Image (spheres, grey):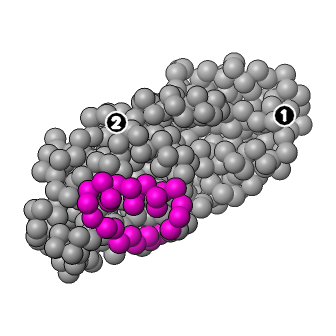
Amino acid sequence: MPYPPRSRPIPAALAAVALAATLAACSSSPDTGSTGTLSIWDPYPQFTAGSAWAKVIDECAAGAGVKIQRQAYDTTDLTGKVLLAAQQHTAPSVLVLDNPVVSTMVEAGVLKANDEVGLDASPASPNLVAAGTVQGRTYGVPLGANTLALYYNKDVLAAAGVDPASVKDWASLETALGKVKAAGKKGITFSAIGTEEGSFQFLPWFWGSGATLTDLSAPPAVAALTQWKSWLDRGYAPNSVINNTQTTSWQEFATGQYAFAENGTWQLENAKKAGFPYGVIPIPGRTGGTAPAPTGGEFVTVPAQDNPDTERTAGKIAACLTAPDKVLTSDTALTYVSAVPSVQQQQVTQKPELAVWVDAVKNAKGRTGDNLGTRYPRISQPLWNAVQGALTGSKTPDAALKDAQTAAK
């Protein structure tokens, strides 16, 4: 998929729908405890009956003494269908949904807090749980996560005399890009398209500068956008990034001509098929360290029901789906880094190439974190508009971000 698989953030228009919805705080599923059948909706239509994911669901349902009716939808379709179902009192018993959408569902009155249904998110990493925390209460448990890092072409860097281990901050990355260009190759490709994908890819540089989403026009933010613009001006990045999705950006890297590509865990299998040796390093912060990258991935949640017994049974199923002994299977199937540190170590033992991704996830941030909640979509769109304005040259980075801050307010 063009965006982190199964991890598209809710668009601003859909957030507005959710905020406008006057949903009752309870919604009853058509499946009740009396029938011994509960429903689960998830955003994984690619995983059919018999898949590892479907088998985990069946095991958890059996453990709770019920049967499960599963419905799988594309992520963008799922959110709208859940909001409508909640209005019609037909919400699913268990809901797996994209992490940026959790706060929207909470505001719309769709979800039950963990302490009401017996869910415990404490085994998961706090930075991942933050996306499901609203006004001090947690809703759901993260199932797993993906995020961004820098893939590199070993042959291109070797020909340019660049040691990838030397890339520790923005300055050393600039030096590496200069050497690559001087050697006749291309520097870096990424997605700066005017959608959430563009914001998603810009955020590691934005956060890595020290900027915050509540002040889009601060000097650190300007420094981040100025850096991206300078890459285009100096020929380190192609002008195509302005329209690149993460898929087309990857296709550029796959030509073997680029030194670096910003992309995610979902490209690992494609990287193995690229036909050249590759490696992965964290996205560096402006002055060093690993830049916080945004998290993709879903939460397992429990929608409110008329029947408390149904909610408690749904809570048992949700707890089972996110238990350490289950998520290793699930996260492997979903190509996610686990949200549970102990499971992350098992993943690295099985696949050492995941080590850099585990570190990236440990440093990652939820886009709706920092108590932004449903404010995030109203910030993200002005931000991607600012990136577009600066990269196309219609505005300076400073002016573009000042306009973005005004729009975000």
| Element type at mark 2 | loop
Q: Is residue 246 magenta?
A: no
First in sequence: mark 2 vs mark 1:
2
On the image, the x and y values in percent for residue 256 come to: 84, 44
Identify the mark at residue 265; answer none if there is no mark.
none
For the point 48% across and 32% down, which residue is it? Answer: 344
Give the answer, above or below, for where 21 lies relative to 304. below
For the point 56% across and 41% down, which residue is it? Answer: 148
Q: Write down the region rendered in magenta.
A: 49-75
Instruction: List the residue tagged with mark 1.
Output: 156
Q: Nearer the viewer, residue 220 or 81?
A: 81
Q: Is residue 72 magenta?
A: yes
On the image, the x and y values in percent for residue 258 come to: 79, 42
Give the answer, above or below, for where 238 lies relative to 136. below
Q: Residue 33 occupies which quadrant of the picture?
A: bottom left
The amino acid type of the residue labelled 2 equals: Ala
The amino acid type of the residue labelled 1 equals: Val
On the image, the x and y values in percent for residue 21 come to: 19, 73
Instruction: List the residue tagged with mark 2.
Output: 124
